[in-house]
Amino acid sequence: MKKSHVFTVLCICLQFWSLGQNTPTTTYQFASKPSWADEFNKNGLPDSTKWNYDVGGHGWGNNELQYYTEKNLKNTRVENGILIIEAHKERLNDNAYTSARLVTKGKGDFLYGRFKIRAKLPTGRGTWPAIWMLATNPIYDKNYLPNNGEIDIMEHVGYDPGRVHTTLHTKNFNQNKGTQPSGNRKLADFHSAFHTYHIDWTPDKIEAFIDNELVLSFAKVSNKWEDYPFDQSFHLLLNIAIGGGWGGLKGVDESIFPQRMEIDYVRVYPLKSTIRKK
């Protein structure tokens, strides 16, 4: 290579290096105190200022077998500082089981933050508990799922005991295409001990943890909503499904009921950002 060409290449490299040195980098921090939380300190029905109910059956798009009830102490209640969501083998409106699905929509809608939930999970073939988040409004597409995004903080299917999953879904990254970002961790005492499931959600990425161990990191790969719709308000959901396309893949053991998920707390810490130069 001629000396003049070498000099030109060096100048270009130096220019890019200089730009990189002057480009601000965003680092994110979370508040030390939650801005929204439920510690479940009052016995009875869940706090109506924080939780709504999804109600009904008909499979919920996943061929599930349960009917979600509303304000039914048999299926959802607070006892001694613990929220209990309990599934029973009983027929209701042509569904073989009853359960509950609590949602914060309209009472807890969030854009970014640290979300921590301490929970003990049900066990047995056919159970499908979940701690997850959905977009509050379908602003990107009328096809609500997966196009507007889904954040599965915790999922567990009873036929694979102890393997706890965390997964994200978007239009371009989802289970139908087999492209969904996902991670899991094996917990031998998932049903007998409480574990902490949490995500850190920022404008740049979502990271998921089980007992503070990182199990998934998904960075914003583009500005296309089809890739990363996680720049809008989401709400929390807590439920136990029975059967369904994943939970019922190997059938349902009818002898295991009732089965419960216990929640010690739900805490949401708001995002704080700091701009710093390299």
Image (tube, rainbow, N blue to C red):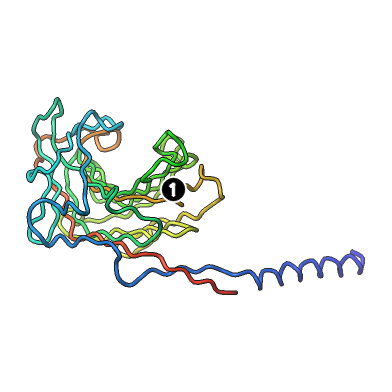
Q: Position of residue 178 (x, y in %)?
A: 44, 38
Q: Position of residue 56 (x, y in %)?
A: 20, 33
Query: Between residues 114 and 183, which one lies in front from this camera angle?
Result: 114
Query: Between residues 13 and 278, which one lies in front from this camera angle?
Result: 278
Left/right placement of residue 50 relative to residue 14 reads left
Q: Position of residue 76 (x, y in %)?
A: 12, 47
| Quarter location, residue 249 | top left
Left/right placement of residue 124 relative to residue 205 reads left
Q: Which residue is mark 1?
A: 181
The local crowd at label 1, few if under 14, some if 14 to 19, many if 20 or more residues have their Cα within 10 Å, is some
Q: Residue at x 51, y 53 (%)?
A: 220
Q: Position of residue 9 (x, y in %)?
A: 82, 66
Left/right placement of residue 206 relative to residue 95 reads right
Residue 147, above or below 189 = above
Badge 1 amino acid: Pro
Helix, strand or loop at label 1? It is loop
How many labels sit on residues?
1
